[in-house]
Amino acid sequence: MTSSEASPSFRLAYVPGVTPTKWVRIWNERLPDVPLTLIPVPAAEACAVLRDGGADAGFLRLPVDRTDLAAIPLYTETTVVVVPKDHLVTAVDEVASEDLADEIVLHPLDETLEWERRPGLPAKERPATTADAIELVAAGVGLLVVPQSLARLHHRKDLTYRPVSDAPASRVALSWPQEETTDLVEDFIGIVRGRTVNSTRGRSQAPAPAPAQPKGKRSETGGTRRKPAGGKPGGKTAGKPVGKSGGKSPRSGSGGSGGPKGGRRGKPRRRP
C-alpha cells in the first residue's frame, strides 16, 4: 500500500494567484471517498513543502528543480504593472518596460518573475511580500510588476493594472515528488489533463476491460478458406473456356450438333 492510499486525504498545495477550485470540484465528484485538503503556501516555499512531504502535489510557478520534482506546465500568465488609478499609464492599453524607465518599480522578496534586467528605478528597500508592495503602490511610493493573477488577488478599488508587453511571463505547473507518484497523484494528473472518467486511472471509476479474445478464434472464423461445393478445389475450372460449364453445351437440336435453335424450323411437315 502506498503512502497516498494510507493517508485519509489527498493534500494539494497551491501558491498565491492559483485557483484550484475547478479541479477540486472534479476530484470531489470522482473520488468522493477521498477528501482533498488544500494547503496554501508562499511561492518561495512550495518546492520545500513537496520535498518534505507536506503535500502530495502542488500548483506552483516554474522553474523548479526537476532532479527530484516532476512538473507538468499548465498555462502561462500575462504580466502586468499595478498602478494607482490616476497614473498616466492608465491612458494606454499596454506598456513596454522602457515606458517605466523613470518610475520606481518595487521588487518584493517573494517576486516570482525572472528578469534579466528589471525595469524602472530601484526602491530604497525591498518589500517583504507582494501584499506589502501593493500597499506601497496604493501609497504612491512606486509601481509593481506581477503576474496578472496576483494583481487580481490583491485587487483594490484605488488600483488598476496594464499588461507589460516585453516582461517575462510566469508559468504555472502541477508538481510532485518523482519518487512519490502514487495512484492518487495519477488520479489528480488525469483530472488536470482533462481526462474523462473512463480514461482516468481511478481504481473504481473506469469500467473493467473486456477479456482478451484468444488468438486462435480469429483463424477459426475468418482465417479458414472454404472449400468449393462437392469438395472439389476451386481452381480446377479456372482454365476452361467461357461458355462451357460442367461439360454441357447450350440447348440444341435432337442431334446435339450444337447448331442454332432455329434449325428445327426447316424440317418438312407431314402432309395429311
Image (cartoon, rainbow, N blue to C red):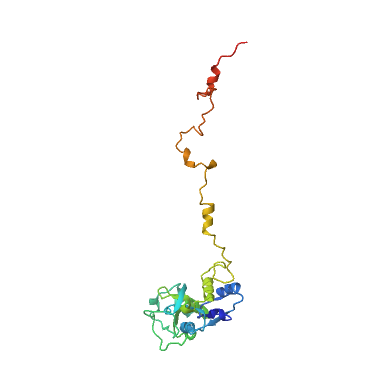
Between 60 and 36, the one lying in front of the other is 36
Q: Can residue 26 be seen in this snapshot?
A: yes
- Left/right placement of residue 5 relative to residue 235 reads right
- Left/right placement of residue 37 relative to residue 111 reads right
Q: Which residue ends up furthest to the front in the rendered image?
A: 231
The quadrant where residue 118 appears: bottom left
Between 6 and 232, the one lying in front of the other is 232
Q: Residue at x 54, y 56 (%)?
A: 217
Q: Position of residue 38 (x, y in %)?
A: 55, 80
User: Would you place residue 196 above or below residue 252 in this image?
Assistant: below
The quadrant where residue 121 appears: bottom left
Quarter of the figure with the N terminus? bottom right
Q: Position of residue 54 (x, y in %)?
A: 51, 84
Q: Which residue ends up furthest to the bottom in the rendered image?
A: 125
Q: Position of residue 70 (x, y in %)?
A: 45, 76
User: Would you place residue 155 above or below residue 249 in this image?
Assistant: below
- Left/right placement of residue 252 relative to residue 123 reads right
Between 71 and 92, the one lying in front of the other is 71
Between 157 and 251, the one lying in front of the other is 251
The quadrant where residue 22 appears: bottom right
Quarter of the figure with the C terminus? top right
**How many discs mark residues in the rendered view?**
0
Q: Residue at x 53, y 53 (%)?
A: 220
Q: Residue at x 54, y 73 (%)?
A: 187
Q: Which residue ends up furthest to the top in the rendered image?
A: 272
